[in-house]
């Protein structure tokens, strides 16, 4: 949709931030948090500090931080999303910090025990070089022996569940209509949001790339991560090329190899 007098094209998650929790109300963040906590507990050692990339409005952080009493920092590229997360944390009196950070390339002031990037965050990186840059930054952010837990949506997910990305909703002066299209040749999944906030109209376009397992495995290996596990969709079963979602656990080696 082209920009006109009544509709403004905006960057991803700028207008959407106001109603993001409505759009994502179907997500069971308590289930996600319990699963990630299991991954950290099963594969990690002395996990205390956690850096979340692409934290959105902080819904996962609010559920996950208490499970391990983690020293937890949530980060997101969108300042609008971070502001919503800060408000939610303040209202919940939660022991969380939120900062604006672009995870395509970043530095941290001190090493952390675990880095997490969930719910298609990786898929927003449209080129393998961008994935490589993100992973290299995560590698440097981790202490030796630290874990990087992340997931990826696969081409199968886009092919099989395209209808799940078509919906609409409204509440408290915010309304959205979501449309989705997947190009199997380019493996680009485009989702558009037509948003109304108090009679003002916005249009956002979100593009993700569906990577294969082999592509992600190869990049992680190039960066220097040790493979720990690749699980199928919220389970502890090994992921396969038929998986819709893959949950990866990789480790920064304890010493240079």
Image: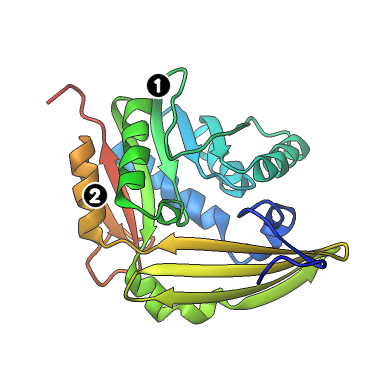
Q: In which quarter of the image is residue 225?
A: top left
- Give the distance between the C-alpha atoms of the residues marked 2 and 1, in whole angstroms: 22 Å
Q: In this view, does 74 lie to the left or right of 213?
A: right
Residue found 61% across the figure and 55% down from its top: 12
Quarter holding the N terminus is bottom right
Q: Residue furthest left?
A: 257
Mark 2 lies on a secondary structure that is strand
Q: Which residue is drawn at 63% across and 73% down?
A: 178
Identify which residue, 45 or 207, lies in the foreground: 207
Residue 225 showing in the rendered view:
no
The disc at residue 96 is none
- Which quadrant does the C terminus fall into? top left
Q: In which quarter of the image is residue 250?
A: top left
Relative to 50, is 119 above or below? below
- Total number of numbered discs in the rendering: 2
Q: Name the residue under label 1.
A: 111
């Amino acid at each position: 949709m082209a920009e006109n007098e009544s509709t403004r094209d905006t960057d991803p998650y700028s207008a959407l931030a106001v109603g993001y929790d409505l759009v994502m109300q179907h997500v069971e963040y308590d289930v996600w948090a319990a699963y990630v906590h299991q991954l950290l507990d099963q594969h990690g050692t002395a996990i205390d500090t956690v850096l979340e990339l692409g934290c959105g409005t902080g819904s996962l952080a609010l559920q996950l931080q208490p499970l391990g009493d983690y020293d937890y920092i949530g980060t997101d590229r969108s300042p609008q999303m971070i502001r919503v997360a800060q408000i939610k944390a303040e209202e919940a009196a939660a022991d969380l910090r939120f900062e604006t950070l672009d995870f395509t390339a970043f530095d941290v002031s001190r090493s952390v025990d675990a880095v997490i990037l969930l719910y298609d965050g990786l898929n927003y990186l449209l080129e393998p070089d961008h994935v490589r840059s993100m992973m290299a930054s995560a590698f440097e952010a981790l202490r030796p022996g630290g874990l990087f837990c992340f997931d990826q949506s696969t081409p199968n997910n886009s092919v099989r569940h395209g209808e799940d990305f078509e919906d609409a909703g409204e509440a408290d002066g915010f309304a959205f209509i979501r449309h989705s299209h997947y190009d199997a040749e380019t493996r680009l999944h485009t989702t558009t949001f037509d948003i109304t906030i108090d009679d003002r109209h916005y249009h956002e376009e979100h593009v993700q790339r569906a990577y294969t397992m082999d592509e992600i495995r190869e990049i992680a290996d190039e960066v220097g991560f040790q493979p720990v596990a690749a699980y199928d969709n919220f389970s502890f079963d090994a992921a396969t090329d038929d998986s819709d979602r893959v949950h990866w656990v990789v480790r920064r080696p304890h010493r240079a190899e």
